[in-house]
Image (tube, rainbow, N blue to C red):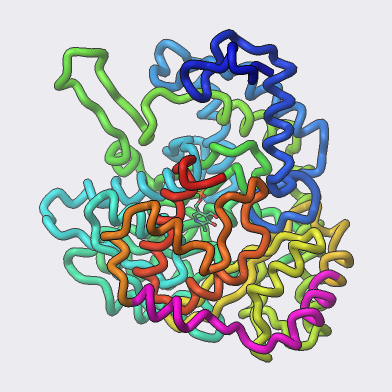
Amino acid sequence: MTDSASTAPAHPGLPATGRSTAELLADLAALRAADLPTRGRRTTAYVYDSGRPEVRAAAEQAYLAMLEVNGLDPTAFPSVVALERQVVGATAARLGGDDATPGIFTSGGTESILLAVKAARDARPDLTDPELVIPATAHAAFHKAGAYLGVRVVSTPVDPAGFRADPDAMAAACTDRTVLVVASAPSYAHGVIDPVAEIAADAARRGIPCHVDACVGGWLLPWLADAGAPVPAFDLSVPGVTSLSCDLHKFGYAPKGASVLLFRDEAMRLRAYYACAVWPGYTVVNPTVQSSKGAGPLAGAWATMQALGEDGYRELGRAALAATARVVEGVKAIEGLTVLGSPDATLVALGTDADLDLFALADESRARGFFLQPQLSVDGLPANLHLTLTGVSAEGVEDLLAVLAESADAVRPLGPPRPPADIVALLEQVDLTELDNATFAALLPAAGIDLSSADGPARMAPVNRLLDALPPTVRELIATRFLSALYSPHLGG
Ligand SMILES: Cc1ncc(COP(=O)(O)O)c(C=O)c1O
C-alpha cells in the first residue's frame, strides 16, 4: 500500500505507480466484506446462485475469454453473432418461438424493456403523444422507458386481492394513441402471472402490440411447468403477444448483464435498432442502447446455459418450487405474517394481517443473516417483504422460517410501524429540489441514516417507515437526493 506522505498520489483514486494484482484483489475482498453474500440461500433478492461450482467456473472462464471482445462491430468480431444466435435461439425455443424468431441479447431487463417500448413507439411515427398501457404492478422499467422515450405511461388498477392485471381496466385505458400494452409473467412485486391471453387478445383486436415482461419468469416458468406447476400460457405461443423479455441473469443463473428480447416479427426488431451515419466517424448501427460493449456477459450466459443444460434447469426449478411451497405453508404458522395473493412462480411477497412492522422485521431478519427486500405501499397495494426463492433456497428453507418466526416475535411488541410525523410534515413542506446535497445530508441523521458508516446503514426500518409515509413523488426526490449524497465522498465518512 502506498499511503506515506512522500508517495501519496497526486490524483485521488489513482496511484502514482502501478500496484500488484494481489494487492488489488485484497482491496476488493475488503470492500466486499460489507456486501450481501452473493452465494448461498440467505440473500433472497438481487442474486441468483445455481449452487453449482462447475457452472460458475464455466461462466467465469467464458466471461474472461471474451473480456476484450467488443460487441460494437459484429463484422469485426463474428464470435459475438455466433454466440448471440445460440443464446437467442435457445431462449426462443423455450418461449413459444423457433430458430427464426428475431431477438436481441441485451444487458438486462431494463434495457430489453426500453428497446421493446422504442420499437413500439417507432412503429407509430404518426403519433406525437404516444401512450403505454400497463398494470399498476408492472416493473418500474416501463416508467423509466416512458420517461426516457417520451411515451406517456397509463397505469391501470389491478385486482386488489390477487394482484393480477385487470384486462377490462387495461382495455378501457387503450386509446388511438396506445402504442403498446404490457403484461407480466410474473410480476416482480407479487410473483403472479397476469391474464396474458386476455390482454394480448384484446390488444390484437385493437391492432396494438403486446409485450410480455417475462424478465424474471421467462427462464423459470417453463421449468416449473415441467415440474408439474400449473403455468398458464404466457409466451410467444399466445396469439397477440408481439414481444417478450427474458433475463438470463435471473433464473438463467448467468452472470449479470444478460437478457434476451424476443420479437414476433422482423419488422419490430428493426425498429429497436439504431443507426447513425450523419457524423464523420465509423457508421454506427446498434441493436442495443450500449454501443461499445464487452462480450463477457454474452459468453457468460452462453456458458451457463451450456453447462446447466435442460436437466440442470429442470432440477433447479424443481428445487425452487419445493422451497416456495414450504415457505408459503410455513408462513401460515407465524402469527401476524401472511403471503400476499397466490404466487404463480417462486417469488413471494410477505404481508401482515396484524399490523406487524414489516420494516423492523426485515432488519431483525437481516441481523439474523437473512436479507428480505422491503417493498413500499403504493396505489392502495400494501407494503410487504419480497423473497425470491432459487434453486439453492430449498436447503435453507427451515432456517429461513425459523428466522422469520423469531423476527416476528421480536417485532410484535412494537405494534404497527410509526413513521416520524415531524419529519414527514417537514419533508412535505420543504422543496427538495431546492436543497443542496450538504443540507440534505445534514437531515439524514434525524431520519436514522448514517452515511459515514462504511458498512452501510445497518437498520433500514426508520428510512423505510419514513418513505412509506410519503407520496411516491416525494419518495423519488428523496431517493435521488440520497443517491447523490451517497456518491458524494465529501459528505460521507
Ligand atoms: C419482472 C421484471 N421486469 C424487469 C426487471 C428489470 O430487470 P433488470 O434489473 O435486469 O434491469 C425485473 C427485475 O427484477 C423484473 O423482475
Write the residue at 78% across / 87% down.
Answer: 335
User: Going by the picture, which residue comes out furthest to the bottom?
Assistant: 354
Residue 395, percent across and down?
88, 57
Write the residue at 72% across / 54% down.
Answer: 43
For this rendering, which residue is in front, 442 or 286? 442
Q: Which image quarter is the N terminus in? A: top right
Is residue 225 shown left or right of residue 294? right
The part of the chain drawn in magenta is: 403-428
Q: Is residue 92 visible?
A: yes
Q: Quadrant of residue 416?
A: bottom right
For this rendering, which residue is in front, 345 or 296? 296
275 up-or-down from 478: above or below: above
Residue 89, percent across and down?
54, 36
Q: Is residue 192 visible?
A: no
Q: Quadrant of residue 361?
A: bottom right
Residue 164, percent across and down?
50, 76
Is residue 80 shown left or right of residue 455? left
